[in-house]
Image: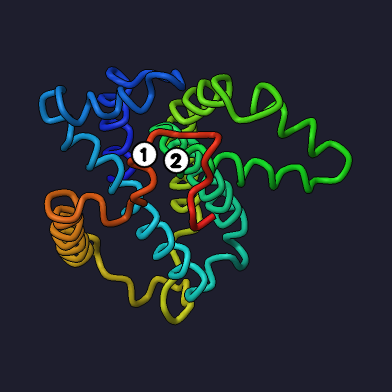
Amino acid sequence: MCLVIQILSGILLSTHYTANIDLAFSSVEYIMRDVPNGWFIRYVHANGASMFFIIVYSHIFRGLYYGSYMKPRQLLWCSGVVLFLLIMGTAFTGYVLPWGQMSFWGATVITNMVTAIPFGGQTIVEWLWGGFTVNAPTLRRFYSVHFLLPFIIAGLTIIHLALLHKDGSTSPIGSDTGVDDVPFYPYYFAKDLFAFTCFVLFFGVFVFFFPNLLNHPDNCIPADPMETPKHL
């Protein structure tokens, strides 16, 4: 559900966003001020990313607790790890797009960490930047990657579900006998409906009442390569 929300809201945002270092910040403000319900679409997309990670981390901790990484579900776990890495990459590239202070300096600091890779680190980071520093080519590349990755994630999610269907999910006691299994309806249906309702209420509180709580104030300032945020 989170992935569907992110893809739909992201497509709507992309119709108004401009991947240009001189216009990116202004295009986000245009979405907020002049696009009908643009503020809602942006806040859904921004806070939806945070909700996505809350659910993903809960899912990972559940898998660790139930031993979902053990035989015969190794492939299922590995596909989940790849999904998690792709989600992190999508979130990082998306955070750069508003081109505020934290977007610019976040991209600068995190991509510079790639230079720690022996031998080819500097070459890789210059390829990521499209030059010798974070600039216009970087923003265009990150925008392209950010638009592409969710569809790759959607495809890999189908593979993840297929692997889950092959071996089934784990249980709190680690039993795979199926003796104590309960039918999906009405038990799991009621559980999922309750979880969905709680999620929508929790999500709605952030979108409508605290939309910038998970954002950083410095990202409301246009990117300035000559001024480092104080806390950095």
> Residue 53: x percent and y percent?
40, 55
Specify the quadrant of the image occupied by residue 62. Answer: bottom left
Q: Nearer the viewer, residue 48 or 38?
A: 38
Q: Quadrant of the C terminus?
A: bottom right
Secondary structure under tag 1 reads loop
Q: Residue at x 29, y 17 (%)?
A: 15
Is residue 189 visible from the viewing direction of this image? no
Q: CA distance from mark 1 to mark 2?
A: 6 Å
Q: Residue at x 60, y 30 (%)?
A: 134
The residue at which mark 2 appears reads as: 101
> Residue 124: x percent and y percent?
75, 32
Secondary structure under tag 2 reads helix
CB contact under 8 Å: marks 1 and 2? yes
Say above or below: 87 vs 203.
Answer: above
> How many marks overall?
2
Colour scheme employed for the rendering of this structure: rainbow
Q: Nearer the viewer, residue 93 or 84?
A: 93
The residue at which mark 1 appears reads as: 221
Q: Quadrant of the N terminus?
A: top left
Callout 2: 10 Å neighbours few (<14), some, many (20+)? many
